[in-house]
Amino acid sequence: SPTSSVSSPSSLIEHHFEIMIESINGLRAFESMVWGESDCFIQYSFPIEHEQQLTNVNAIKPFKLHTIRTATTLCTSDPTFHDTNKFRYVLSPADALHKYFYA
């Protein structure tokens, strides 16, 4: 009899990432910038799992890049952010997480 290609929830593997942005040391000011008179933030992109991936583990592209931005803080030579983001990915054992991150 044919086997189903849909993985059961018990056979899925969870992967967890936590990105912490604490501070920047030795930030250099732009020519026209005066310390303490502007705000700064860090913005980056990180792959997130599509919502349909949670129910359809056979999705072709389970991830999309999502833009993440810290809260603004006063711009100094050593600004602090204390920003944390957690990411969870659920894949079948046959899927290698890194192949989606490098694609």
Image (tube, rainbow, N blue to C red):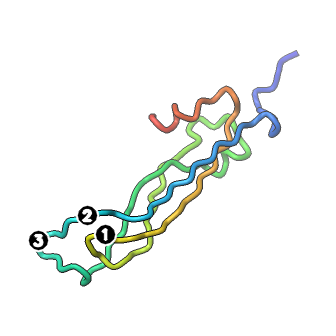
Q: Which residue is mark 1?
A: 78
Mark 2 or mark 1, earlier in chain: 2
Cβ–Cβ below 8 Å for labels 2 and 1?
A: yes
Question: Which residue: 67% across, 48% down?
Answer: 52
Foreground label between 3 and 1: 1
Question: Which residue: 40% across, 56% down?
Answer: 44
Going by the image, does 55 lie left or right of 80? right
Cβ–Cβ below 8 Å for labels 3 and 1?
A: no
Quarter of the figure with residue 76:
bottom left
Report the amino acid beneath label 2: Gly
Report the amino acid beneath label 3: Glu
Foreground label between 2 and 3: 2
Report, in whole angstroms, how far the alpha carbon at label 3 lies from the one at label 1: 17 Å
Tag on residue 31?
3
Q: Is residue 25 above or below residue 51?
A: below
Locate the N terminus and report the quarter of the image it occupies.
Answer: top right
